[in-house]
Image (cartoon, rainbow, N blue to C red):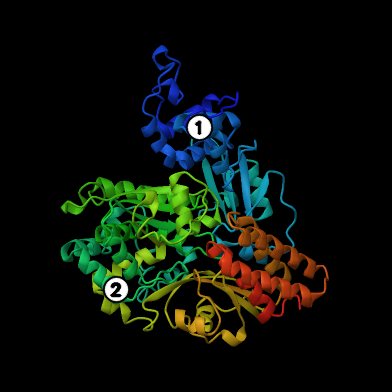
Amino acid sequence: MDLKLSNHTATKAEVQAISSVLGDPDSTWRGGDRAAADHHVARGGHSLRDQRHRLLPVLHAVNDRVGWISRGAINEIARRIDVAPAEVYGVATFYGLLSTVERAERQVHVCIDLACMMVRPDAEPLPHGAHESPCLGLCERAPAALLIEAGDPQVQQVIAPATPVAVRAALAGDLTGDAADEAPVVQGVPQCADGAIDDLVLLGRIGRTDPTSLDSYRSAGGYLALRRALDIGAVAVIRELTDSGLMGRGGAAFPAGRKWDAVARQPARPHYIVCNADESEPGTFKDRVLMEGDPFALIESMTIAAFATGCEQGYIYMRGEYPRARRMLTNAIAQATARGLLGDDVMGSGTAFHLVVFLGAGAYICGEETAIFNSIEGFRGEPRNKPPFPVEVGLFGKPTLVNNVETMVNVLPIVLNGGVAYARRGTSGSTGTKLFCLSGSVARPGVYEVDFGATLRDLIDLGGGLTAGRTLRAVLLGGAAGTFATADDLDVPLTFEDTRAAGLSLGSGVVMVLDDTTDLTAYVRRIAAFFRDESCGQCVPCRVGTVRQEEMLDRLAAGATAASERDLMLDIGRVMRDASICGLGQTAHNAIESAIVKLGVMS
């Protein structure tokens, strides 16, 4: 096809980066040297177009190597995978971590989102070379920043806490001291730091085993669950999952057993499994802690899920701002593959399962399951209409199982001990334990594991109570798409059914504590700005509604007549909730409405 290439050419470094993913071109039609035999005949066009799913990894490779993606690089990528430059550009500009504008090789992305803005409300302007960033998933160590330095290899370095001194040092190339902070994972899990692991189901290995060692994981019971799964068979595994009553932990709370059974029953082949590790909800960091501190548990869980549902290929779709989690999982996959726990013959059972880490590039919307499919397939990460549902038509048009990290790791105790035993913890409607991301004005922020049915008061007490000298103003429950709780809600049991009855939302497990010093107006406006920026723009209710919502909050903050503006905003919120394609637009108004109605913000 005529790709309409411009006259821009790629640099040597860009060509090398592209070839590191696609391999060297073998003809002029694929970006190779001109040869007489190639002048008028194109060969292998269909196989070339089958490379579309490698578009995002190629864009990552170029961006990582030189710091941005030039017009010449876009031309070269278009030629190599037979995709129009306009489409390559459209995908490249969709993601926050990629740039089509030349920029410095060394950048620092400084979080300005909810947890970080609470500890630096009057922060000085960012130094030259630093960029504002949405939540980086480091809320327990706020304020946070991420250093990214282009090169071969690219350098990514967490900076937390991100003091002005540390940010300036990182920009100057000084990666020592505060600017090279690599805090132990156990720091983010206070229960493990205290040694209080007896009742922990999902966090019990963190701090006790070496996350880089397969032998260490197996010494703590690792891969016993996979062995039992292979012994009892796929049907029995799904029955145990159904008996457990496990509900999805990503926010939608869909019964996991029903989803697995639906995928397993689909006659179309192949089946795929995708672990949603793109947690980008402001205030959420539990999946990061699991991947960093217990990566083999996720791999074992996914292998069991693949066996039970007939999937031979799996993807861990991980947000691009998690450098340590990426290192841990890449290492764990390599070790598991070398030891026969992944690959063509898992544990000598004849079952094949291959697993890769697929990096996102800074798009909150890609936490939506069908947006993940588009992203992996090489398109803009926009959600798809449902039905058809992923269990029937998912990744590459085939039946696909999608669960998030926390949901997946619950599989191990269910298979090991049985679904009935698992269901004895928690409540009848919310079985098992739940991970909560406690942050904000508490003495010990971090990930906490409690039985369903514990209260907000219990959780805040586990975190050491409020910061000394502060009083409670509100609690953001469930994240930016969640709801606000007040002191009157502290004794509501944290279960799906009880929070729903109280008009609250568990969401992804965010518990962000706001004290009396919090500027609620600024806080709510930041939530609106987040959703306006993260909307993919595909559907009108969300694309326009999130902008109008922010504009009205700005007018209210500037002193506009409150009643009429609030009524209009609530009406727009209802339209977004009823008519948006996906969960982003459907929930983008939740916390704002909660703040207006329940907290009296801007009244």
Place of residue 107 in the rendered image (x, y in percent of width and height, measured from the top left): 62, 43
Q: Residues within 10 Å of mark 2 (few under 14, many from 20)?
A: many
Looking at the image, residue 31 sits to the left or right of residue 591; the answer is: left
| Residue at figure coordinates x 42%, y 48% from the top left | 358
Which residue reaches farthest top? 36
Place of residue 165 in the rendered image (x, y in percent of width and height, measured from the top left): 67, 51
Place of residue 542 in the rendered image (x, y in percent of width and height, measured from the top left): 61, 61
Q: In the rendered image of this protein, does residue 62 appear above or below residue 414?
A: above
Query: Quick one: SS at disc 1?
Result: helix
Residue 32, image quadrant: top left
List the residue tagged with mark 2. Answer: 242
Three-letter amino acid code of the residue under disc 1:
Ala
| Residue at figure coordinates x 58%, y 35% from the top left | 69
* Residue 102 visible to the viewer: yes
Query: Quick one: SS at disc 2?
Result: helix
Place of residue 479 in the rendered image (x, y in percent of width and height, measured from the top left): 56, 69
List the residue tagged with mark 1. Answer: 78
* Residue 134 visible to the viewer: no
Q: From the viewer's side, name the closer residue of 243 and 109.
A: 243
Looking at the image, residue 139 sits to the left or right of residue 277; the answer is: right
Three-letter amino acid code of the residue under disc 2:
Thr
Q: In the rendered image of this protein, does residue 422 appear above or below residue 321?
A: below
Q: From the viewer's side, name the closer residue of 386 and 291.
A: 386
